[in-house]
Image: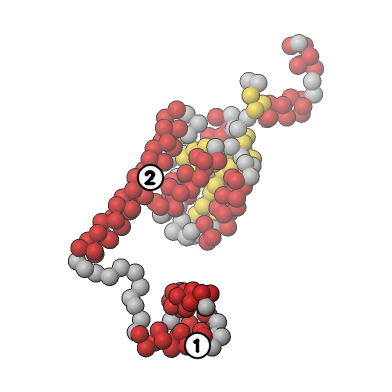
Amino acid sequence: MPYAIRVVKAHEVQYACCRFSLGKAMKRAAIYLRVSTQDQTTSNQEHELRQAAERADWQVAKVYRDHGISGAKGRNGRPAFDTLCRDATKRQFDIVMAWNVDRLGRSLKDLVAFLSELHALGVDLFLHQQGLDTTTPAGKAMFQMLGVFAEFERSIIQERVRAGLQRARREGKRLGRPPIADKLAERIRTALAGGMSVRKTAAKFDVNPSTVQRIARPFDDASVTA
């Protein structure tokens, strides 16, 4: 068997080594590069990340570049990042590599959402400057903690909303949309009775269509009963 391996053509051995390592399929890595100004270059980031991929025995499947684009912009404002996210859902790679966490975004909310999405898809993350590698046990623990923090944030927001509603009720404040004047409500009913649509009625009296629908509901019920 060793003799058979030696006589295989060099390019075939190179291809086999590219696809497999120690009998296991190599991880496919996607490199994401971003610089904020046109006079900056992504070459240094790419060089370091390619070296890291080589040391980890990962195959670089694709490189995504956003050049001269601020990290403060959302996904829609960064074409390469948007493509990266869509390709992740197609499982075109197994791990995302970035030079620094701020290359991925400046908003903590958006960043946590992105990392949580990767985790749900089973895609790992490597951040060079932070030394984060979710293919390791410590990195996986960090991914799990993200879910805990996201749930904690949602719980805090829900608790604040409930507390605010309870305080408003204790103070006697009315919750929801304020009621409209009786005369205006009567004019809306008259327009609806005359066959005018909800949307046209809302535009005519400069009110929200949902307000017209709320007024029309008892009117419709009465029509059905009649």
Estimate the x, y position of residue 189 in percent, counting from the top left: 46, 84
Q: How many marks?
A: 2
- Amino acid type, residue under disc 2 in the picture: Glu
Q: Residues within 10 Å of mark 1 (few under 14, many from 20)?
A: some
Q: In this rendering, would 110 be left or right of 50?
A: left
Q: Camera-side residue: 129 or 114? A: 114
SS for callout 1:
helix
Q: Residues within 10 Å of mark 2 (few under 14, many from 20)?
A: few
Q: Are marks 2 and 1 in contact (CB under 8 Å)?
A: no
Residue at image position (74%, 11%) is 2
Mark before the other along the chain sequence, 2 or 1: 2
- Amino acid type, residue under disc 1 in the picture: Ala
- Looking at the picture, does residue 123 appear above or below residue 158? above
Residue at image position (34%, 84%) is 181
Task: Determine the image quadrant of residue 194.
Answer: bottom right
Q: Which residue is mark 1?
A: 191
Q: Camera-side residue: 113 or 139? A: 113
Locate the N terminus by quadrant: top right
Task: Determine the image quadrant of residue 17.
Answer: top right
Estimate the x, y position of residue 90 in percent, counting from the top left: 63, 45
- Looking at the picture, does residue 141 appear above or below residue 223? above
Estimate the x, y position of residue 170 in percent, counting from the top left: 20, 63
Q: Which residue is mark 2?
A: 151
> Which tag is nearer the camera, tag 2 or tag 1?
1
C-alpha gap between disc 2 and disc 1: 48 Å
